Amino acid sequence: MDISIIIPLLNEEASLNELHQWILKVMKSNGYSYELIFIDDGSKDQSWNIITKLASENTEVNGVRFLENFGKSQALHAGFAKAKGDVIITMDADLQDNPEEITALYKMVHEEGYDLVSGWKKIRYDSKLAKNLPSKLFNFAARKTSGVQLNDFNCGLKAYRNEVIKNIEVTGEMHRYIPVLAKNAGFSNIGEKIVKHQARKYGETKFGMERFIRGFLDLITISFISRFGKRPMHFFGAWGALMIVVGFLFAFYLGIDKLFLNPSGRLITEKPQFYIALTSMILGSQFFVAGFLGELILRSKKDTKNYIIKENI
């Protein structure tokens, strides 16, 4: 199979038929063998009924329906697990991503050898204050923190080699950082392509300003994981050792002071240095324990599936 197209969606009943016909036109004109996987992330409208109808009319259409809304990352995770194509294309269901871009993205992965190609919506038709400016700040911070030089991390239109999506784990809200996850997994040939962005035709956006707050918090997480995800003891152990040394030095000073310099002075427990020493050594020990637990967890079997599928086509 040439292409697997994964489309996560939430309450997009108005756009599904038009999107399906548009994708079908592109696939037929290029002669691709393909599968179209809709991931219904707990829609409350008629989205799943439309997907079921499309699947009955087109054998290339598949669908997964979540019991409730678990988020885009879990939707992509389910789609990646189901995908069989040599090249996997992800796109949004709101018609703001242009299916005609699939051809160029497929060629960049299949013929030019990219592991991952991310779309770049250079010209956007969103609110400049609500989306464009925060998006630019977010992408700037992501580039500087991760070292992946992309202009649009959050673009839903991306293409992957099959090996990439089978070797990364998309959890929480980490769908924004799939290129970073791919880089950390050893897939460093990451490209970018300017893609057409279209104004929303139906409905309204499912994401508000809070996504940028969560995005920056996730950026801190992914930055830490990128540096210490495979060696947590290097971080926690270093800080633990530093704090234990600081605590020991204060304790040593208190002992020398009491025994030789000022034996008739205040009790050790009455001095503020005593509490600094005690707190430093306790925190240092806790950092060491955290490092050991991190190493143990890292070596245990991980399961990223935390969604519940209600129906499957």
Image (tube, rainbow, N blue to C red):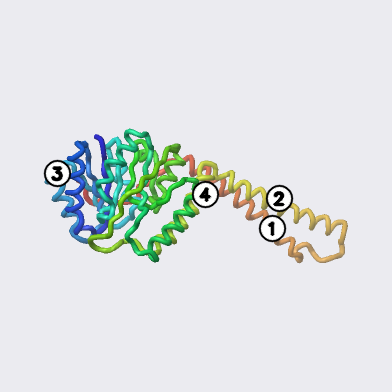
Residue 77, position as x, y percentages in the image: 33, 46
Q: Earlier in the sequence, mark 3 or mark 1?
A: 3
Specify whether 243 is left or right of 259.
left
| SS at badge 4 | helix
Q: How far is mark 3 from mark 2, CA to CA? A: 68 Å
The residues bearing labels 3 and 1 have C-alpha atoms spaced at a distance of: 69 Å
Q: Amino acid at mark 2?
A: Val
Q: Do tag 2 and tag 4 residues touch (Cβ < 8 Å)? A: no
Mark pair 3, 4: CA separation: 44 Å
**Mark 1 sits on what residue?**
278
**Which residue is label 3 attached to?**
58
Residue assigned mark 2:
245
> Dot 2 surroundings within 10 Å: few (below 14), some, or many (20 or more)?
some
Of discs 1 and 4, which sits in the foreground?
4
Mark 3 or mark 4: whose residue is earlier in sequence? 3
Q: Nearer the viewer, residue 82 or 302?
A: 82
**Nearer the observer, disc 2 or disc 4?**
4
Please report contact status of discs 3 and 1: CB closer than 8 Å, yes or no.
no
**Residue 113 in sight in this render:** yes
Distance CA(mark 2)–CA(mark 4): 24 Å
